[in-house]
Each structure stands twice: as C-alpha cells, then as structure tokens.
Amino acid sequence: MAHTIFVLNGPNLNLLGKRQPEIYGGETLADVEAECRRVGNEFGFTIEFRQTNAEFQLIDWIHEARESADAIVINPAGWSHTSVAVMDALAACTCPILEVHISNIHRREEFRHHSYVSSVAAGVICGFGTHGYPLALQHLAKRFGA
Ligand code: CA2
C-alpha cells in the first residue's frame, strides 16, 4: 500500500524564492512541491504538500496527519523556535517526524539555535537548502523499504 507523507510548511515560506535568496535560495515553494512530488512518485508515496501562515491551521493539519499519515516532513519555520503548541501536536503523533530547515539555523542568530520541534523529531535536516526536502523523502523510502 502507498505510504502517505504530509509535507507541512510554516509561516512565510510562501515567500520562498521571492525574497532573501542569499539565505533561502532562488527556488519557490511551488518548485519545492514539484520536486517533492517527483521524488515521492519514485517511491510510490502519496504527498500531501501544504503551507500555512496560521498556527491553528498547522496544528489541525498535524492532527489530520496523526490519523492518516505514515510520516510527517515539516519545516515549522519561525514556529520551530516559539511554539510549544506545535510541538505538543507533533508529540501526539506516532509516525516518524522529520524536521527540515532550508538554512543552517545553527550558524544564524542565537534565537534560531533552539527548536521545540527537534525534541519530538526522529531527525533534523538543516543547511542543505531546499534539497533537504527530497533528502527527507529519500530517508523515509529507506525506512519504509519503498
Ligand atoms: O531555514 C529554514 O527553513 C527556516 O525554517 C526558515 C524560517 C526561519 O524562521 C527559520 O529560523 C529557519 C523562515 C521562513 C521564511 O522564509 C522566507 C523565505 C523568503 C523570504 C522571506 C522569508
């Protein structure tokens, strides 16, 4: 049976490729989605790719993923560093959670060095640009034997 992977994106990632390319690169979120679908397809994954600027919406999607996803790939963006609520929602999931950051948060401002989400993630990928997303999917393919 096909594995369903929720790829969830937090606030301001809709601006990807439109500002700050020196930090986040030139690809848009639509490009990232297309790449996730291409790679996901290779492994027979069903990809649910979403972005929101509303914290309650992300929490509702995590609750949905809790019921129907085999894994969650999440870039919580700014909420990584602030949101106990997003961490709590993820902690209620039994499926693997892979945290992705486009930039290397550890060589940026001190306030980005801590992520609440990392404490509930199976693994964290950061600093590989948007390539972090397909890397996360490749890991899941290996994990699931897909
Ligand atoms: O490196 C990442 O992926 C981040 O999660 C991105 C977040 C930032 O708050 C985290 O510390 C690290 C910011 C997402 C906003 O992305 C933008 C992209 C282009 C222009 C403006 C914002």
Image (spheres, rainbow, N blue to C red):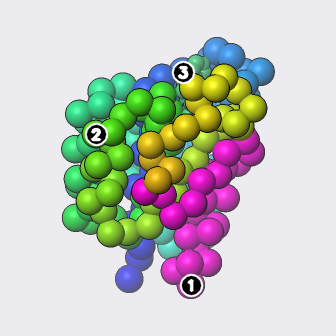
Helix, strand, or loop for circle 2?
Answer: helix
Q: Residue 64, located in which quarter of the rendered image? A: bottom left
Helix, strand, or loop for circle 3?
Answer: helix
Q: Residue tagged by mark 1?
A: 145
Question: Is 102 or 112 nearer to us in this picture?
Answer: 112
Q: Residue tagged by mark 2?
A: 85
What whole-number distance in Å separates the C-alpha atoms at marks 2 and 1?
32 Å
Q: Is mark 3 within 8 Å of ligand 1?
A: yes
Between disc 2 and disc 1, the foreground one is 2
Q: Is mark 2 within 8 Å of ligand 1?
A: no
Circle 3/circle 1 CB separation < 8 Å = no
For the residue marked with disc 1, what is the amino acid? Gly
Question: Is 145 or 41 nearer to us in this picture?
Answer: 145
Residue displayed at 47% across by 53% down: 119
Return the x and y of residue 84 as percentages of the image width and height.
Answer: 33, 39
Q: Which quarter shows the N terminus?
A: bottom left
Q: Is mark 1 within 8 Å of ligand 1?
A: no
For label 2, the crowd category at 10 Å Cα-Cα, with few meaning under 14, some 14 to 19 and many 20 or more, is some
Examine the structure image and report whether residue 45 is included in the region drawn in magenta: no
Residue displayed at 35% across by 46% down: 87
What whole-number distance in Å separates the C-alpha atoms at marks 3 and 1?
34 Å
Tell me which segment is drawn in magenta. 120-146
Residue displayed at 36% across by 34% down: 83
Return the x and y of residue 50 as percentages of the image width and height.
Answer: 40, 42
Earlier in the chain: of badge 3 and badge 1, it is 3
Rendered view: 14 above or below 83: above
Circle 2/circle 1 CB separation < 8 Å = no
